[in-house]
Image (spheres, rainbow, N blue to C red):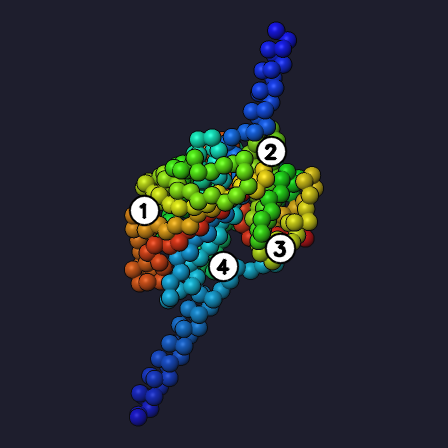
Amino acid sequence: MKKAILSFALVLAAGLLFAQKKTTTSAVVNFDATTSIDQLPKAENKTAVASLDTKTGKLAFEVTIKNFAFSNPRIQDHFNGAGWMNSDQFPTATFSGSITNLQAVNFAKDGTYAVTVKGELNMHGVTKAVEANGSIKVSGKTINASSDFSVKLEDYGVTGGAIAAGKVSKEPKISVTAEF
Amino acid sequence: MNKRFKKWLIVTGVVVLSCGAVLWYLFTEKFEDTKKVKAHYTVHAIDLIKEFQQDEAAANKKYTEKIIIVNGTVSEIKNADTTANIIMADMNSGAYIIFAFQQQHVAEARQMKVGDNVSIKGSCSGGIYSAILETEKIDFKRCTVNE
């Protein structure tokens, strides 16, 4: 009986030690909607929440829209305003999905692995299926996940004079990095 | 060219130049160094967290896009190549405040240690409930050590 309890305790401890769901409070999301006419619509958000389940490949991100830091106050106001992201009404953007080729990643071995991620992106109150390429870099106990992709603002109901006038890219580039 | 036309030309020129100057200013303006900006509020980290937990909507209305000085204890430090985040957490609930430092002040954040009692000034981006972490989080941007 004592052996069974000890074995159970050891298994539980091992499970906790090698927790498969990893989270971070400090994923970085870069947003680049610059054009040849305007180099200002560009910002970084350094406090995105992210989670990665190394057993199932499930991946999730949450980004507080108001924490995208622009260099210019006017562009910051426009970005958060009703004509753009409308962050008072839609304070967060979220992604929920998974790595589709998880078998190609060995989380126990240092290396860089190319991955494909599929899921749903919710932004400005609209949810769309998305797919993107990315990479997972394993280095000891650290896992770095990154991906670059574009979003079509019109698909998420984000339109406006600045976009039509070519001052803001219709398909801004998004880059995401998370260290777990 | 008669006098009236010349006058009209000068006035138009002045108006156009003035508008151009205003537009130039608006689109080249940058956020000031947070160290030089006066704070709207000074709070303790745990009190701020509790205020958001009790009524997130009211707290967001009060604090969002305001410059706030937060005094508290460093719970965690997140350093990356070009960024540094400081976290003050409520150990009971797990709710936390996260401060993203202005680029010119990242070095200050990197000097902090877990357990330090610090005072940080930054622009509050509001609080949300994180479904991933199952707790309240309050974001700050353009942060600096408060002196």
Find residue A98 and name its label.
none
Disc 2 marks a residue whose amino acid type is: Asp
- The residue that label 3 is drawn on is B105
What residue is rendered at 29% in x and 60% in y?
A: A164
- The residue that label 1 is drawn on is A156
Quadrant of the rendering where the N terminus of chain A is positioned = top right
Question: How much space separates mark 1 and mark 4, taking CA atoms?
Answer: 25 Å
Quadrant of the rendering where the C terminus of chain A is positioned = top right
Q: Quadrant of residue A98?
A: top left
What residue is rendered at 51% in x and 36% in y?
A: A107
Question: How much space separates mark 2 and mark 1, taking CA atoms?
Answer: 36 Å
Quick check: A18 left or right of A166?
A: right
Question: How much space separates mark 3 and mark 2, taking CA atoms?
Answer: 25 Å
Disc 1 marks a residue whose amino acid type is: Tyr
Circle 1/circle 3 CB separation < 8 Å: no
- The residue that label 2 is drawn on is B90
Disc 3 marks a residue whose amino acid type is: His
- The residue that label 4 is drawn on is A71
| Labels 1 and 4 within one chain | yes
Q: Is residue A44 above or below residue A25?
A: below
